[in-house]
Every structure is written in C-alpha cells, then in structure tokens.
Image (tube, coloured by chain):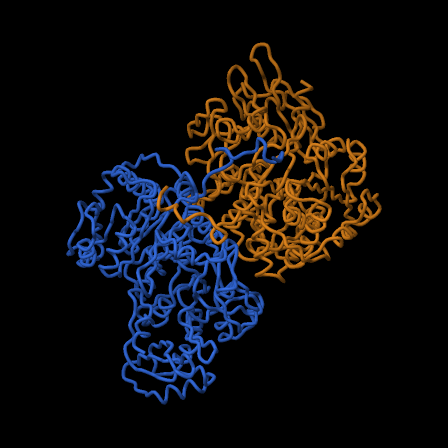
Chain colours: A orange, B blue
C-alpha cells in the first residue's frame, strides 16, 4: 500500500455518493423562492416543489416503498411529473415513467415486467390504463390518480382508477421527512422502457452517478447559466426528459411546462416567460416554422434550442434560425441518459452560407465533455472506420452516462455491451473533422450487390420531390442483387405523381444502384411517438 | 441481491474512473486548433499543448516515474506549468507545485517530506532552490531546469541546477505515448503544501474524482460558457490554480498567462485578448483600481472576476464594479480544491445601493452545487449555530471536493475530519438568509471576559482610519479579562497619529470591550504570499 492511501481513505467528510438529488437540496437552500415550475396558473417555487416531493417520498415510504422498488407514472409534463422525478428517488425508489401514448397491452407489459408497486396515472389516459390494469396479471398495485383540472374535460370527465387522488396521497406524507442520498451511487434511479419497433420494449436502468454527471454536464455545456427559463417540451417520460429537470436544479432554473404542444402554446410560453432554452424533436421546430402569423409571438432575446431524435432537415434548420432561434443538433439514446453527442460549433463555420451551414449542423457531431468514448466502428471486429466521411460503421459509446443495462434482460444487456462499448444500432460515417453523421439504423441498411445503401440517403432525396409528404425506404429481397430499395410514399394532399416520375427524380440525384426499384403510394404506419414503423413496411414487401 | 444489480454490474462500456484528464482528451479531439495557452509571444493550441504534455508524461515514465510518484515543480504561470498540470497526472504521477516565494528551508522540507522524485525548476528561483538542494538529505532527485527567455535576465542569467533543460527533457519523451486514465478515481492527482503560519507546511492530497467534479462544477457555475478567455493570475502552484486549468478543458477555453502581475500587464492582457474571466485576491483588484490612467485600457465586454483569499473590503468591491468588472466573492481552501462557497447573487439585491450591496457581497456565501455540505457549527459539539448573523461557529465542509487528507500526517488528517466534516479553522456566522460570513480564524479570535472578539471586526475599523495602511489585532494576556485586543499598525507614508487617537477612533465604532487596550506602530511581518503573520505579532505581546 502506498503512502498516498494509508490514512487517506474515504470518509464522510471527503466522500459522498453522487446523485442529482444533491442539486435539489442545494437549490432549495440557495434559491428557495425562485420558481421551479410554471404550469398555466400553477406555480411552485423550488421550496414549494421540494415540499411536495418530500410529501410524495414520505407517502411512498409509508406504503413500504424503498430501495429498488419501482414507482410507475403515466403523465405528460405537469407539476406532478416534475416533482416525481425528484420525489420517487428521494424515497430511494426507482422512477418508471411510461409513455402516455402506449397501448394497453404495452402498458400492462411494462407494469408487469418492471414489478411496479405503485402507479400514478393522469386521468386523461384512464381509458388505456384501465384496460391495462384488467390485463395485468396481479392485483397488488397501488394506484393513484392525477386529476389535472387545467386540462379540462379530457381529465375531469375521465374515470379515476385508483384508491385515491394524488393530492390526497401527498397529504398522507410528511414534508419533514429526513431522507438521504443513496447508499451507493450505482443504485438505480430510473427505469425507462424504450419504445422498440419490434418485440417487447426493453427497460433501460439508469443510476444516480450517471444522472449526476449528466445534470452537471448539461449545465456546463449548453450552458444553462444562472436561472435559465426552460420550456419543457421533451416529455419527462422520454429518457427522463433528457435529464434536464435534474440539470435545472444545478443552476436554479425554471421549467415552463407545456401539456399540449402546438405552435400557439409554445410561442405564448416563450413570450410570456422569456424562455431561454428548450429541447425538442425536429417536428417541434417544424411546428414553430409553420405557425400562422397569428400564432407567432415576437421575442428579442436568445432562445437556445437542442434538437434530437432525427437528423433535422437542412431546410428546417435554416428556417428556424431565421426566426431567431439558436439551434444545436444533439444525439443520444435512452440508454445514454439522452444527448451524449453534440454538433459543437466551430469558429471556421462562421463564413459559410446558410445551406452549407445547415448541412454541417445536421450531422450528429462529437462527444460531450462528460462522454468518455465515442467511435464509429465495425460492429463485429470493433475496429474504428477511417474518418473519410464514407465508410459506414456503428456508433458506439462508452462512459459514465451509459445505462447499467436492460432490466431483467441479461442477453440484451450483454449484446449491447459487447466488446466493452455500448452498441447504439445507428450506422454512421465519421468525417475528416471527427464529426459523426448517421446514415441509417443498423437494421435499416440495404445491402445491394454487396454495396451498402443508406435508406436515409434515399429518403432525403425523396423528401425533395414536391409531391412527397413522407417517405420510407426498406430492403426488398431480390434474386440477383440480394436486396434492392423499395420506397413507400405518402403524398401531399391534392397532388399526384407516379412510380416512373419518382424513380426518375431519384436518378437525377443518386447513383443508379441506390434508386428504388419499386415505389408504393400509401399512408405510412407510425409508432405512438410518430416514428415510421419500418418493420411493418418490411412485412409488406 | 436485487434484480437491479444482477447482470447490471459496472463494465468498461458504462463505467469509467472520473478524472479531469478525460476533458483534455476530448478538448483536443473537438477543438484541436483553439488556443489553450498564450504567454507573450508563445502560443499553444490545445493539440500543441497536449503534445507537449504527452512528451512530458512519456519522459517521466522513461525515468521510471509512475503511480504515486511525486513530481515537484517550482514555476510561475508559464506554459510549462500549465502543461505539467496535465502531463504529470497523465504519467500516473502526483503533481506537487511549490510556491515560488518560499525560503530554501521550506523548499527542502517539501522536497524531502513529499519524497519527490523529480524537480522541475524555473531558473529565476535558482538561488533559493540551489540552497534547498544543498540542505536536502538525499541526492537521488532528478532536476530539470526551465529557462524562460521571455523573462529576460532574471531567468537567463541565473544558474541552471539540473541535468538538463526542460525542452531537452521533453525531447526524451514520445508524443505517441499511449497513456490511460487512473485505475482508481481515488488516486492522488496532486499534493499541495499549505503555507501554514506556524510549524511545517502540511501536504494536501487531492484525488482525480474531486478534480473532475470541481472542473465540471466550475464550468457550470461561473459559467465559463464556450471558449472563455481566462487570464491566469491565480498561481498554478496555489491550490492547482483553483482547478481552473482542468475546467478550461471542459469548455475549450484559453488561458492568458501573466508571469509578472501588475496593473499594466493585466489591463494589456484584458484588452489584447478580450479576457472574459479571471480569478484573483482582493489585492489584485486593488491593483486594477489604483492603476494610472496610462496603465488602464478600456474594454466594453463583460469581464467576470472571482475573488477569494480574504474578504474584499466593500470599498474595493464598489470601485472594481464601477470599472466594469463583474465580481463574485468566493471562498475555499487548498483542502477543498479551491472555491466551494460563493456569494451567489439574489434577485432581491438589484435594488440595493452600492454600499449595501458591497457589504452583502463581502460575505462568503453559500455552497456551490457540487459542495455537498456546508455548516457553521460548534467545533466540539458539531451542533450548527443558529442562523442569526451573530453566533460564531466554525465553518465546516463535506463532500466530494474535499481532500483525501494530509500526506504522511495521520494526526492532522484525523483532526481535520473530526465528526465527519472538514474543519476549516475559519470562524463565521450564518445570516438569516443562509449566507455565511467569516469573522476570524479560529486561532485569531480574542476571548475577553468570556466574550468573543473578532480580530477582523476590529481590524476593519482600524482600516477606516485615514492614517492606517495596514492593521492586525491579536490577543494579549490580561490578568483581569483573560485576553484583551492589542493592535499593530503600519502607517501610511507621511502621516502621523498616536495611540489615544486610534483608540478614540475605535470607540466611535465599536463596543468598548472590543477596542484595543494597546496600540503599537511598526511594519507588519508578512508571509511570502503577503499574509500578515499574526503568530509573529503574538510573540511580541
């Protein structure tokens, strides 16, 4: 043993388990009266929000909930959801937010697989949840209803399903609860089931250590600065809202919660509360761009936007920047606590014309300071691809903001961590400047005559045709080539075109072997979160 | 074992030891060409600085230096010092920066006590170091000289003491070194000897985990934003320059190094390089305030200043803000990696007049988001004092940015961590708003007739007398009262006053029992870092 170890062990003065809950406690100590959440007429300061989270934690503990017990919640971004993001882990329990758009069978599967002990459910979703509870194979679940009176009839006229109302449940708790940080920073803090385009969803287990590092990292990198005003559009049930709630506790920020996401509500929130930051999918940016003049509200301060979930089309980036928003494209997965890759701006980009800039910013980018490893490599050999902007490999990530693994699913966990890296399943190239750019999902790549064809590349060309509203390209078996691209197209209202015209359009922009050999016109099947279900289309070819 | 543990263990994909070195690697990957250090005509991009740090690490390893080996360096803020802050830990070794103003006996003590294997020494300090090496009880130290040609004769005309020049030493290294992060985040990263007003200095051991958390925390809290321009005035030999070098790697910042600190050099650096951030003691602020019109250079962008080391007099805060600097008072110790307490601004302060604001901002404040615990408590019972702004207790800190302990000094380590908190030795009150304010050092408090007298409070009054240049108050034994205050005063040039006048001045502003019973006029003894040596004065009463 070295002299640097003897007598220099960890002790309560110099070592504490990392947990984002430490930020909450400090935020309440330093900025007790600063607003934490604003939801229409409801406002809670950090102290008030903390008091409610304490009551929730205490009420849960009174029902025997503690370490490693799962508390599920089905709710949009409302104060109850925000406080559960803190209150459930304060009880020592594991937060399991469930996507509000899921079907009853999937909800039942998640409640069953997660071994949930409590379900907090917003009455707007009672019809699906009621059916899920019927399907559920056990009857020991504690169910609590949230009735959001500000949501009108959709919430107030729906069935309540549980033993009591959320506010009554809070009343059973004690805001003097003496809670503590986890006894191990590796303890689970949340369990998020990924939507999964095929098969049953997988439960992503995140830990306190990663959530701490992510929260601190976001605050430093965006940066949030002091007292940011954050419009919460990213659902808190999606990857814990990209960990932003925990990060806002680092810097005394305010969350403006938007339950119903549309252009009018977003512009109103930005203007009324002087929103400085928000995250959202490219579809959200499109809503803002396509808003009517009546819906748009002017603002004259910087609004910083993170966009992720799909590569934003350059036309979208160009249009949103023109409206005064400052957009950074970021990339991550539920398995990585949200964004671990950012398209960080480079000084040299300042002189570029808007279209070139938009193309460059549509790339996924480089790792954040708290992402220890990012590479594009061969999925089998683990050899990194050359940074030539052409050779396709799989994006792999490693570091402290990667999940513990999939809950009760050793096989998927081992598969995901093969070779000491997390395999994202996203296929990308690495450009000479080190920036990675996604070309396809692993399972969506088309291999024709030994050549890789990126379905995204073909889709991007299809989207440039004026008649195309939505497009998806999948592989179709072919005797000669192995696979060939088959395009599915949803047309804009009132326009017409044909297979020959679409293929001719592709030939103008793509190598022949990449062009669809077949084009079908139909409405495209989508998941509850709006993703096109390619596996359904594959079943049609 | 819970299902949240089974199959969900740490593995190379989801767990990495925390170390600030991870930020360096990422910064080089993402911003290779961005300037890391600027020192007069020398400039290194992050990639160039990293290359030199690699060479240093490799050269050290080639000499057998590795984990837990100590590398000492005596140098001001020059590129060699900056790169050693990264390069020494990259070799797995422990960085031991030594104060350049120390006397030969103390330097010899540190080299001996730390068991240093290498000493890198700037030739300006050769006279003292040469004598230290003579005193040193062993001859196995590898000595390398830095000759800073930009420092002129002071460096180039001094003796070289080692076997080779630093640049030649770098040449023995290989910039293709394949280094790795520490095998344990609890490993020592640095060893900083505190100046200590009495007895031998104590060696503060910091670890990689704390340095990571501190670096990320500073970037988030100040905040640094992207590409800050940081004027490096705080010596890197002082508490690793408050960890700012590591933090700048989080956000791709630039350090403008100032070897000789005076108003002209600082204003020139600010204007030429558009400095956005710097830290410094109140004396540095005074230099900027008292600069001649010729030395001052205008700037029209925000310059954010952290000041620490002593409570800044309100007059200084008022004057520096008037010059356009934005000052935050922070507090910490070498034992806490630098600042762990900040006087965080509150919205309600906006309406205060400048003097009230300066008084409020002169308080040490509240904990940072990454400081897990701060309290003012009774040193023995560990009971927190009431937050009444009056009751004095000791400031205590706990969390991940507290040292491992004192090197080879179990007794002092155990004493410092008594009761599970780090005892700072600073006496303070906690105000009703939670902000702490230092009243005295534990050993400087005067107990007269059972009443505590803060020597700082008396000194503050003495400083308000127009004839006083510097003042120090210590306890003098008294048969009746136990102790009474005795004042030592250094007068301004060309002015005169007497004991009676000074005591009368005190009685105007202080309760009688707090007024000095004796006043002596003399030059005050100071440490090498400019602190008044009260222990010397105590020997005189």
* Residue in view at x 31 percent, y 82 percent: B520
Tell me how many marks there are: 0
Q: Quadrant of the N terminus of chain B?
A: top right
In the rendered view, would you say A399 is above or below B305?
above
Most foreground residue, A143 or B275: A143
**Image position of A132 with respect to B489: above or below:** above
Q: Nearer the viewer, residue B515 or B223?
A: B515
Using residue A461 as the reference point, say whether residue B55 is left or right of it.
left
**Residue at the location (54% across, 72% down)?**
B389
Q: Is residue B365 above or below residue A114?
A: below
Instruction: Give the residue at x 31% y 72%.
Output: B292
Where residue B123 appears, as percent x and y from the top left, is 20, 54
Please state which of residues A158 and B489 is positioned toward the viewer in this rendering: B489
Whole-percent x, y for residue B152 in the image: 19, 57
Q: Where is residue A366 in the image (x, y as percent from the top left)?
A: 47, 38
Q: Residue furthest top?
A: A479
Residue B100 x/y as whole percent: 27, 58
The C terminus of chain B - image quarter: bottom left
């Amino acid at each position: 043993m070295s002299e640097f170890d003897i007598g220099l062990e960890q002790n309560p003065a110099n070592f504490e388990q990392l947990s984002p809950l430490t930020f909450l406690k400090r935020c309440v100590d330093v900025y007790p009266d600063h607003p934490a959440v604003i939801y229409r007429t409801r406002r809670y300061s950090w102290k008030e929000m903390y008091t409610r989270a304490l009551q929730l934690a205490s009420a849960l503990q009174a029902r025997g909930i503690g370490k490693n017990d799962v508390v599920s919640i089905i709710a949009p971004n409302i104060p109850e959801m925000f406080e559960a993001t803190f209150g459930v882990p304060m009880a020592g329990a594991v937060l399991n937010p469930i996507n509000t758009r899921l079907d009853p069978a999937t909800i039942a599967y998640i409640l069953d697989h997660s071994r949930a002990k409590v379900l907090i459910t917003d009455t707007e979703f009672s019809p699906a949840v009621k059916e899920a509870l019927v399907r559920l194979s056990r009857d020991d679940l504690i169910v609590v209803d949230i009735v959001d009176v500000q949501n009108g009839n959709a919430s107030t006229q729906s069935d309540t399903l549980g033993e009591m109302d959320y506010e009554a449940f809070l009343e059973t708790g004690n805001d003097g609860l003496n809670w503590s940080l986890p006894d191990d920073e590796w303890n689970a803090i949340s369990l998020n089931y990924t939507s999964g385009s095929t098969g049953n969803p997988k439960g992503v287990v995140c830990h306190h250590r990663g959530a701490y590092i992510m929260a601190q990292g976001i605050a430093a990198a965006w940066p949030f600065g002091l007292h940011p005003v954050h419009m919460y559009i990213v659902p808190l049930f999606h990857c814990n809202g990209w960990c932003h709630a925990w990060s806002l506790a680092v810097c005394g920020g305010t969350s403006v919660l938007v339950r119903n996401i549309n252009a009018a509500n977003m512009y109103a929130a930005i203007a009324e509360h002087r929103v400085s930051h928000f995250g959202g999918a490219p579809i959200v940016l499109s809503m803002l761009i396509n808003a009517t003049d009546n819906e748009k509200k002017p603002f004259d301060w910087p609004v910083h936007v993170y966009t992720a979930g799909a590569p934003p089309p350059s036309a979208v980036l160009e249009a949103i920047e023109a409206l005064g928003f400052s957009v950074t494209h970021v990339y991550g997965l539920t398995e990585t606590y949200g964004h671990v890759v950012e398209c960080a701006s480079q000084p040299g980009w300042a002189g570029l014309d808007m279209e070139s800039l938009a193309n460059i910013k549509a790339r996924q980018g480089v790792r954040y300071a708290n992402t220890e490893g990012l590479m594009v490599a061969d999925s089998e050999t683990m050899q990194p691809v050359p940074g030539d902007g052409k050779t396709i490999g799989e994006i792999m990530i490693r570091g402290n903001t990667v999940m513990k693994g999939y809950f009760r699913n050793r096989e998927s966990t081992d598969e995901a961590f093969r070779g000491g890296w997390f395999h994202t399943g996203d296929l990308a190239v690495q450009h000479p400047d080190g920036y990675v750019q996604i070309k396809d999902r692993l399972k969506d790549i088309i291999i024709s005559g030994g050549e890789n064809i990126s379905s995204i590349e073909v889709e991007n060309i299809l989207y440039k045709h004026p008649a195309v509203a939505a497009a998806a390209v999948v592989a179709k078996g072919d005797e000669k080539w192995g696979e060939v691209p088959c395009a599915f197209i949803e047309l804009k209202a009132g326009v017409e075109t044909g297979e020959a015209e679409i293929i001719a359009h592709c030939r103008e922009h793509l190598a022949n072997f990449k062009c669809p050999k077949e084009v079908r016109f139909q409405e495209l099947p989508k998941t509850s979160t709006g993703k096109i279900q390619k596996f359904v289309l594959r079943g049609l070819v």
